[in-house]
Amino acid sequence: MLSKLKVPLEKQKVMPVNGDEAVAYAVKQCLVDVVAAYPITPQTIIVERFSEFVANGEVKTQYVPVESEHSAMSACIGAAAAGARAFTSTSSQGLALMWENLYIASGFRLPIVMAVVNRALSAPINIHCDHSDAYGMRDSGWIQLFVENSQEAYDTTIQAFKIAENPEVQLPVAVNLDGFFLSHTLENVYMLPEEEVHEFLGGYRKPVKTYIDYLNREVEYKLDPASPLSIGPLDLYDYYFEHKMPQVEAMKRAGDVVRGVNEEWYELTGRSYGDGVIDSYAVEDADAVIVVLGSSAGTMKYVASVMRRKGFKVGVVRLRMFRPFPFNEVKDLLKGVKAVGVMDRGLSFGSYGPLYLEINTALYYSRERPLLVNYIYGLGGRDLSPAMAEEVFIDLINTAKLGEVKEYLKFIGVRS
Amino acid sequence: MVYGVEEVSGVSSGNPQPEIGPIECEYGRDYNLPLEFNLRKLAETRKPILLPGHRLCAGCGAAIVVKLIGYALRGPAVIANATGCVEVATTIFPYTSWAIPWIHVAFENAAAVASGIEAAYKALQETGRLPFKNIDVIALAGDGGTYDIGIQALSGMAERGHKVLYVLYDNEAYMNTGIQRSGGTPMFAWTTTSPVGSVIPGKTQPKKPIADIMVAHRIPYVATATPAHWADLFRKVRRGLEANGPAFLHVLSSCNRGWRHGLEIAIEISKRAVDTCYFPLWEYKLGEGYYLTDRSLQIARNPKLKQPIEKYLELQERYRHILRPEGRELLKQFQEYIDAVWQDLLNRAVNAPE
């Protein structure tokens, strides 16, 4: 199969880059018209590298060094509405500041791509990784993808444009990568020749066509003096609800598009990430399975492989796509597993971790419901060591043996 | 197209539907439309950018302002509108009054959205994908969206040098939410959040000097205007569009609901704002300085034309309390403030008589 790759490995360029740089190089190759961004740790390297590309004339992108993340997303919305391909990136407080605009980007059906370099939310202020920022945009109508390593950050950033701009989708996509664990850690990353990326994306962005009743014809959905559209009108109880339904439908279609793009990418590069939606490890005959997002999946898979050698039937499910949430796939995949542990790097105070709630929902309709435990870990960048990961597996195995859950919500690696 | 609704009619309800085609041709293809000062010819040859059927209040200043801006366009243009009266009243779905491309994103970010649009058109142009020689980008916001919540985005847009004409239609309070004070509300004005009480006489702070703040950004062009001085407004819109960088136009826009005046006097009140030097007309050109224009220049040349501030205030119930005998001291303060600001402008204006 590998010999049939469109771009065999020897034609891909290996670059020693960190996760942020991997994203910056990906964006450089994507014929992006407008990048509007604001510095925030640990995302800053993305905009630093990208502004170097602009300064050196390596890209024709308009770089808008806005005065806040709120304006970053606003400028991306304006640019995308004008027909451009737009990108931004942020972290933590920056994402929180964008919040109202996230809903507008998706409500306008604009295929903006954003790298979210995951970082804890204040207070207390902390610059290190957790997923509370990404969880905060959970309901905003964005497709949310989580990557495990910098190679995947590069690959997924390019894929994100293709997913977002698919006529069946037309939704913004957030590519999540763990702050510092990925953003600031060097890794060898295979990169495609630029023209291959252009071809993969079909060149520059082409806005979709839509029928506009008051113009009585089909026009491109963009701000065009030749076909004057009013984008963002006041929409009250007589229409608002109906206008939310196409977003619901687009989200339903997004999963298949993410899977399709993952396949296409495999044929192009030889790399794929599970089926694009779920990347599982040794789940088939497992008694105890951990569900996790992001870079921790690497640690969990490694520990699972060690434990497998010792005879423990353990497995790992890494969700690559958090929105739309793959309920049916999760349900099928975890069928017959005795105990499932959901690892959340973030939580909803007064409730469980957001990922746990989704898994719980997915399993509710399963006839063979596994025991379910929520492990909150790694807040504010607290490391998840292999020893801690093993503890989690042992705890889960014991839960399976016991046949009941004593404690549904557990906190891993926190001092008492 | 729309769930559960069979037919969605076109532009506005209630009125005969204006033709869209000719407007497209006019604003979509020409690049150097001359300014037209002959009103008859204007009415015959230009179509408004804001079509009939919008739901702004009867006698609203903002509707007049927007229409006048449209008459001064030189060619294709798009508008990025902040949340506010104009946004709400011109686009209630499924209707729109806009004959040119229009976008509304949120309250505080008209300038940032306009920045993004301008950057996009630049990118499209530089890669040969813009089917127009030029598209002018206009940001349109009220006083809340400019003085207060929108000033950060506005300042950022100005500093970055985007080629955008930012038009502030200043009705001096949050009128869309029901007359709450803003940074643009003048001293002693009554609003629902600066009520006139037995202890506090309305708003106690003066209006923020927004246009001077924009001058301080050293952008190419800043000007003030009113819908009463329409020819002056036309020229300023055009200069703003032609400026080589950001331009800012501060237009006084009366609100009869909030200022508490009759429906038919929006223009008269705008005239008196200038006649009393409450709202002087000027423009600032980078490298040249401030110029008084129109009626304000006449007043500078002939100070006898300057009317006492009562002439402006007496038309508005929001100032009722300072026109009563017990408000005499406040009225004096108001007049002194106006005089000081006017004198300051005279000192700075290049074309003011010595």
Image (tube, grey):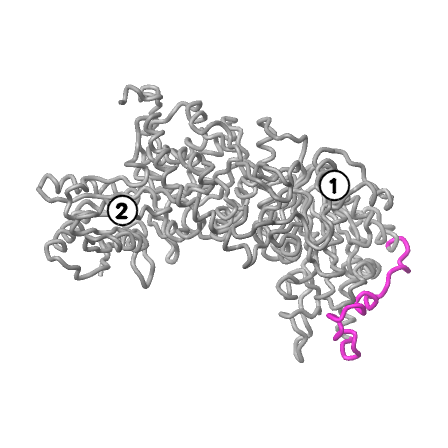
Chain assignment, label 2: A
Q: Nearer the viewer, residue B31 or B4?
A: B4
Specify the quadrant that holds the C terminus of chain A. bottom left
First to last magenta residue range = B300-328
For residue A289, the mark is: none
Three-letter amino acid code at disc 1?
Leu
Q: Is residue A137 left or right of residue A9?
A: right
Is disc 2 on the same chain as disc 1? no
Helix, strand or loop at mark 1: loop
Image coordinates of residue B311 in percent, x first then y, are 84, 66
Q: Is residue A328 left or right of residue B226?
A: left
Q: Residue at label 1?
A: B73
B247 vs A9: above or below: below
The verdict on residue B315 being magenta is yes
Instruction: Judge the density around disc 1: few (<14), some (14-19), many (≥20) Cα neighbours within 10 Å.
Output: many
For residue A330, the mark is: 2
A231 vs A273: above or below: below
Residue B243 seen:
no
Residue in the picture at 77% in, 79% down: B326
Three-letter amino acid code at disc 2?
Val
Image coordinates of residue A190 in percent, x first then y, are 33, 27
Real-space Cα separation, disc 1 to disc 2, in angstroms: 57 Å
Image coordinates of residue A298 in percent, x first then y, are 24, 40
A46 vs A4: above or below: below
The verdict on residue A223 being magenta is no
B181 vs A91: above or below: below
